[in-house]
Amino acid sequence: MPAQRADARRNYGLLLAVAKEEIAAHGPDASLEQIARTAGVGSATLRRHFPSRHALLEAVFRERVETLCAHARELTGRSDTRAALLEWLSAVVADVATIRGLATALTLDPAIDAGAAHEYCCSAQLTEAGEPLVRRAADDGALAPGVTIADLLTLITGIALATEHRPDAAAEADRLLGLAVAGVSPSRG
């Protein structure tokens, strides 16, 4: 990949900073045109850096998703595989429920819409990071047969979207996750 010109790097950084503010204030449907205007660039410049809304959302949430992925890797070696998986799922649901737009970024399925796929696809990254936790929990019998990481991320996304306008979205999302987990992975003993 060729190195970007200094003005292109500056525009990218400025667009990303403005997008973070706009998405925090207005949610994932924040006006792309307003983001470009506020950044002082044209909409073509925005589209050059972010060819789709999902690409922009994924760039905005890249750092947070990478942190969640690192947390999954840290938990993979734990002996209590159920507790490790549940700790990670709680961290994911807390972020997805409280960071405006992150749930929408997770709704992208590159297998369905390959044209919208982006190198930093949030759902793909979290799927890859969570898979070892799910596999280890399943191998230990701590997860109902057939439950996949895709199932769990879809559940979390649904919970987050359902609770995003609640006064304490994180607490409500965590409560609903607890209800779902009781059915997905009943506690042993």
Image (cartoon, rainbow, N blue to C red):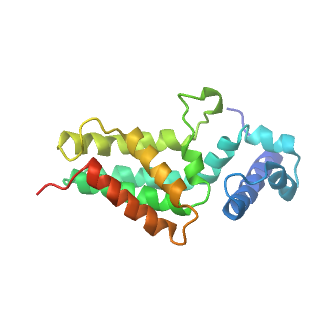
Residue under the point 73% across and 60% down? 22
Q: Does residue 25 appear anywhere in the picture? A: yes
Report the side of 41 relative to 31 (left or right).
right
Residue 41 coordinates in the image, percent (x, y): 87, 50
Compared across the picture, whether 67 is left or right of 104 comes to left
Q: Position of residue 125 (x, y in %)?
A: 48, 42
Q: How many marks?
A: 0
Q: Position of residue 62 (x, y in %)?
A: 57, 50
**Is residue 149 shown above or below 80?**
above
Residue farthest to the bottom, as pictured: 167
Q: In x, y percent, where is residue 3?
A: 72, 38
Q: Nearer the viewer, residue 132 or 26?
A: 26
Quarter in which the N terminus is drawn: top right
Q: Is residue 5 visible?
A: no
Indicate the quadrant containing the C terminus: top left, top right, bottom left or bottom right. bottom left
- The residue that appears at 80% across and 47% down in the rendered structure is 6
Point 44% across, 51% down: residue: 156
Residue drawn at x 89%, y 46% is 42
**In the foreground, 7 or 18:** 18
Above or below, comparing residue 25 to residue 147 in the picture: below
Residue 20, picture quadrant:
bottom right
